[in-house]
Amino acid sequence: MGMFDTFVGDVVCPYCGELHEFQEQTKGYDCLLSEFYMGDYIDKGNANYIYTFDWFCDKDNSKVFDVGIAIRKGQIVKFLVNEEIEELKNSPLEVLDNIEDGLGKRLLYEKVCKEANGQPREELKFELNPLPEGFKFVAFGVEWEVIKLYRQKKGFRGLAYYYEIKSKEHGLRIMESYEHTWYGDQISIITLEDAEKYKSVYFD
Ligand SMILES: [Zn+2]
């Protein structure tokens, strides 16, 4: 009930020329709260078509334009704006090739890895907590070492542990280690600057 999926991507705004991110909810697919990025196979029907909707300039919401998502054999292969949609509509969609499966998600994850800020794909067994000083593990494809365990503020998210960690590549970070009911044992890593904002909540 009330479920949907969301298209996520960037288009060049025809008004200001800058890249704007769009997030367009759709009820046209499985409605499992999935996020659809460039390169994702979303249509089991293997079909070719253009999904269109209105988007707007970030700088002036009254400036509206058309966005088209070109689906080629069930895969998101191109984002289109205004007349590009009409042009492609008038040509067979076969002019488009399929692209790397999961391209958008890969690029997004590479950015997260580069900044070492967010949720790595690597997992860390929750039962290993509390981790001792000097404990080593891999996240975002690089090795990290536990510097110290933070005492957690009483009553705040009892199922997580917080650590100061460091890596050769990224320096100091804060890590949260927690148990996730659906996705297994996860960690998230944030920068010290981000952690500063929440310190009073996380740490005693
Ligand atoms: Zn704009």
Image (tube, rainbow, N blue to C red):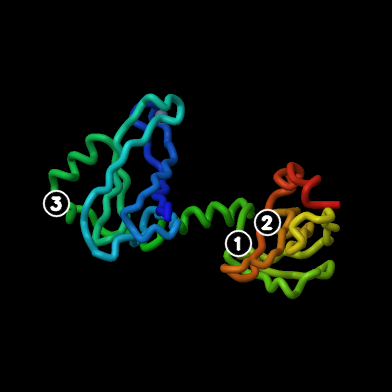
**Considering only vertical position in the picture, is 26 above or below 162?**
above
Among numbered discs 2 and 1, the one appearing first in the sequence: 1
**Could you tell me the amino acid type at mark 1?**
Pro
145 vs 70, left or right, is: right
**Considering only vertical position in the picture, is 175 above or below 135?**
above
Residue in view at x 61 percent, y 68 percent: 181
- Disc 3 to disc 1, C-alpha distance: 40 Å
Residue 189, disc? 2
Among numbered discs 3 and 1, the one appearing first in the sequence: 3
Q: Residue furthest front?
A: 1
- Residue at the disc numbered 1: 120
- Disc 2 to disc 1, C-alpha distance: 8 Å
Determine whether label 3 and label 1 are within 8 Å by CB: no
Residue in view at x 17 percent, y 45 percent: 89
Task: Give the class, few, some or many, for how many residues have Cα within 10 Å of label 3's Cα (few <14, many ≥20).
Answer: few
112 vs 103, left or right, is: right
Residue in view at x 54 percent, y 52 percent: 111
Badge 2 marks a residue whose secondary structure is strand
**Could you tell me the amino acid type at mark 2?**
Ile
Determine whether label 2 and label 1 are within 8 Å by CB: yes
**Depth check, front residue: 8 or 173:** 8
| Badge count | 3
Among numbered discs 3 and 2, the one appearing first in the sequence: 3
| Quadrant where ligand 1 appears | top left
92 vs 185, left or right, is: left
**Depth check, front residue: 50 or 100:** 50
- Residue at the disc numbered 3: 92
**Considering only vertical position in the picture, is 88 above or below 185?**
above
Q: Is mark 1 within 8 Å of ligand 1?
A: no
**Could you tell me the amino acid type at mark 3?**
Pro
Location of residue 86 in the rendering, given as x and y in whole percent from the top left corner: 19, 39
Badge 3 marks a residue whose secondary structure is loop
